[in-house]
Image (cartoon, grey):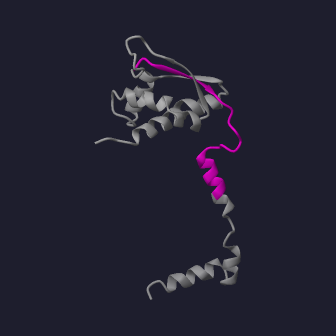
Amino acid sequence: MADYGATDRVRRSAAEQYVLPARARKQSTIKIHTGAFEKSLVQSGVLQPNRFPIVCNALRSRKFLTQNRLELVDVQTPPSAPSGQSSTVVFTYRLGRVAPSSVPIAVTAHTSLLSLRGILKRTYKKLGGAERFHNSQRTDWDR
């Protein structure tokens, strides 16, 4: 059965293993060797062995490039792999600048959650306080 989420898992793993650490080190370019990357994907259970077409397609996809603000600078393929989908392909990317609005999703979710803090304060006050309200709900639960 086909696994349509494999490409997204490959893109996410590439971002976690290569792009984010490179940004943290303030690098301007990164190289991803498909053989080494695929080996790490297999070892971590993200992908089955010998799925180089999925790996190569994910690494050259527009979605991967735009999500991670990358520019594909070079793709080195050996003459023996004219399709560009083998274990010896090396992708070279230039890291684009990250806009302040494009923070990681986890940070955005945390900030959004904090913005909800205190939202029920007035409602609980009208009901006699949060503790009183919840206690009344517990006692009425089985009725």
Q: Quadrant of the C terminus?
A: bottom left
Q: Position of residue 37 (x, y in %)?
A: 45, 26
Query: Closest to the observer: 80 or 115?
Result: 80
Q: Position of residue 12 (x, y in %)?
A: 50, 38
Residue located at (58% from left, 36% from top):
66
Relative horizontal placement of residue 117, taking residue 53 as reference (left or right): right
Relative horizontal placement of residue 15, taking residue 81 as reference (left or right): right
Vertical position of residue 121 compared to residue 14: above or below: below
Q: Which residues are magenta?
A: 87-112
Q: Quadrant of the N terminus?
A: top left
Residue lying furthest left: 1
Vertical position of residue 29 compared to residue 69: above or below: above
Residue lying furthest bottom: 143
Write down the quadrant of residue 113 in the picture: bottom right
Relative horizontal placement of residue 51, taking residue 131 as reference (left or right): left
Q: Is-magenta flag for residue 114?
A: no
Vertical position of residue 137 compared to residue 64: above or below: below
Residue located at (53% from left, 37% from top):
63
Q: Is-magenta flag for residue 90?
A: yes
Q: Position of residue 126 (x, y in %)?
A: 69, 83
Write down the quadrant of residue 129 in the picture: bottom right
Residue located at (65% from left, 57% from top):
112
Exactly how many numbered labels are in the figure?
Answer: 0
Q: Position of residue 72 (x, y in %)?
A: 57, 25
